[in-house]
Amino acid sequence: MMRAQNLTKTFNPGTPIENRALRGLDLDIPTGQFVTVIGSNGAGKSTFLNAISGDLAVDQGSIHIDDNDVTRQNAWQRAGLVARVFQDPMAGTCEGLSIEENLSLAWQRGARRGLRRAVTPALREEFRARLSTLKLGLESRLSDRMGLLSGGQRQAVSLLMASLKPSRILLLDEHTAALDPRTAAFVLELTDQIVADGKLTTLMVTHSMRQALDHGDRTVMLHQGRVVLDVSGEERARLDVPHLLAMFEQTRGETLDDDALLLG
Amino acid sequence: MSFISLMGALEIGLIFALVALGVLISFRILNFPDLTADGSFPLGGAVAATLIAGGHDPWMATGVAMVAGAGAGFVTGWLNVRLNILQLLASILVMIALYSINLRIMGAPNVPLIGEPTVFAPFLPADGDAGYWIQPLVLAVIVVIAKLALDAYFASQSGLAMRATGANPRMARSQGISTDRAVLTGMAISNALIALGGALYVQTQGGSDISMGIGTIVVGLAAVIIGETLIPSRSLWVATLAAVIGAILYRLFIALALTADFIGLQAQDLNLITAVLVGFALVLPAFKARLRKTLGGIGK
């Protein structure tokens, strides 16, 4: 369960470039729900995600994950509860470290790190088994540097890393945006599979209305730092991209001029 | 070059291998440009020399010197992660503060250690003969222990967290790594090693001097760069080995350049030789690549 209440965040307050990214955002996600988030550029999607992960401290409001008030915790303190896949395939992994070392870092997510060996033979077997589920042949390349992998492979490994240890919420930050369409489809399929297998509470930000409707159980639209649309169940099943667009325009009472929302 | 001067060069090379390992941690693993070395090397020397001259056990004195070095590194790291002072600037502040602190510790610009016991004393023959190869041997054992300990640490969970902190801090935090703590720990280990080098240096050179730290960081970096150029590798245990070899080769080059009479170089040319050597090591990889390309073109 994740509960965000009345989140506000203003960048550069009191200056000409003041940007009110979040303006009282409320969102409740029950355990096990897969929520997709859409919104135009500057709607506050990334700010919202960074607020949940702890990369960014909010000005007001509170964030609860299960019974934990994490509002004042920074990113590394919440990492035991929050798993994350970044948009940039380079951002979620260490390219200078080997695949098994990256997996080992994720294996200890949120746990104490001591002087025990980071990669043991038993752990290597575990990683090999997990990697083989990706069907990318990476299980035979455990000691290869992460930097040798393609963007899609790295993103697949990032997903695996995020699901290696249990989390209370999984954050996916436009994690297919930097990939070519075929690879993006593969990573999305993998996402569905991993989320379903682990019954993970998930928040996926996407630029594509198509993706937002095709994946997950509930779709939320952000605009000017607030939730302006929240559909699930029957209502969502009947929705198509043109409907969603129409609803958006109706809600905001204005015409949408952002092509980015239509893409995909 | 005589055997004795070769051993002398090896001795200083091994001491600077410890400095190089320290520099490898800050510059390469943590990605933290740290100039504290110019202060923490003489800090180690000052602490060790003062304690030994005061009648304390040389091993204990060397240990305390390492703790002092760790403290200096910790302060540099703290200025950066807690007060957000730019890395380079934080280390410069600590470096110049240490100049005063080192004078305070020694109570004079230098502390001689002539006739005092050193960590090498138990291994040296009583008549003072043949000592010139025993000191490098003891130093080699210390360097090998330091290198293996570092390799083991960086293969551990905590060591891996430190490497991730330097390589991708945002990712490290998202995996629950306190990057602040990793920087503080790494800076402490780095400068403890450099101070160990300083403590051993004064025990081989017969005393501590306030100006002994000048250029330490350049020599440490030179060693790391020469090592990387000669033995390029992504694996960490090779990188530590390369740093050690780089430090020894650097001192051998210097000794060779200074003792080869036909070149006409003298002791005061040391820094010039260093600059030329480091410059050469920096352009060597690009030069090798171009050479390979040219040769490949001929082959076609």
Image: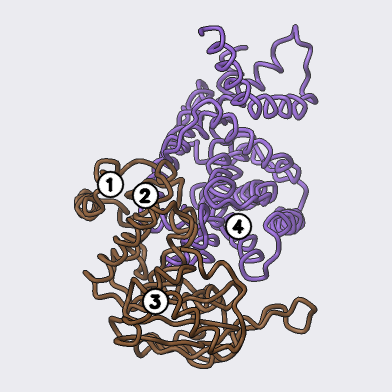
Chain colours: A brown, B purple
Do the dots labelled 4 and 2 sit on one chain?
A: no
Residue B104 visible to an observer of this rendering: no
Residue B230 visible to an observer of this rendering: yes
Residue B28 vertical position relative to residue A179 in the rendered view, above or below? above
Q: Do the residues labelled 2 and 1 touch (CB within 8 Å)?
A: yes
List the residue tagged with mark 3. Answer: A240
List the residue tagged with mark 4. Answer: B73
Query: As drawn, is B5 to the left or to the right of B212?
Result: left
Query: As drawn, is B217 to the left or to the right of A74?
Result: right
As helix, strand or loop, the secondary structure at mark 3 comes to loop
List the residue tagged with mark 1. Answer: A136
**What is the CA distance from the residue labelled 4 to the residue labelled 2?**
39 Å
Q: Which of A191 and B60 is in front in this view?
A: A191
Category of crowding for the residue at label 4, using alpha-carbon neighbours closer than 10 angstroms: few (below 14), some (14–19), many (at least 20): many
**Residue at 71% in and 41% down:** B212
List the residue tagged with mark 2. Answer: A153
As helix, strand or loop, the secondary structure at mark 2 comes to helix
Mark 2 or mark 3: name the one nearer the start of the chain.
Answer: 2
From the image, which quarter does the N terminus of chain A lie in? Answer: bottom left
Q: Which chain carries label 4?
A: B
- Can you give x and y, in whole percent of width and height, for residue B175 in the image? 41, 65
Category of crowding for the residue at label 2, using alpha-carbon neighbours closer than 10 angstroms: few (below 14), some (14–19), many (at least 20): some
Q: Which chain carries label 1?
A: A
- Can you give x and y, in whole percent of width and height, for residue A85 in the image? 42, 64
Tell me the amino acid under the disc marked 4.
Gly
**Residue at 37% in and 46% down:** A98
Query: As drawn, is B50 to the left or to the right of B107?
Result: left
User: Which dot, 3 or 4, sits closer to the camera?
Assistant: 3
**What is the CA distance from the residue labelled 3 to the residue labelled 1?**
33 Å
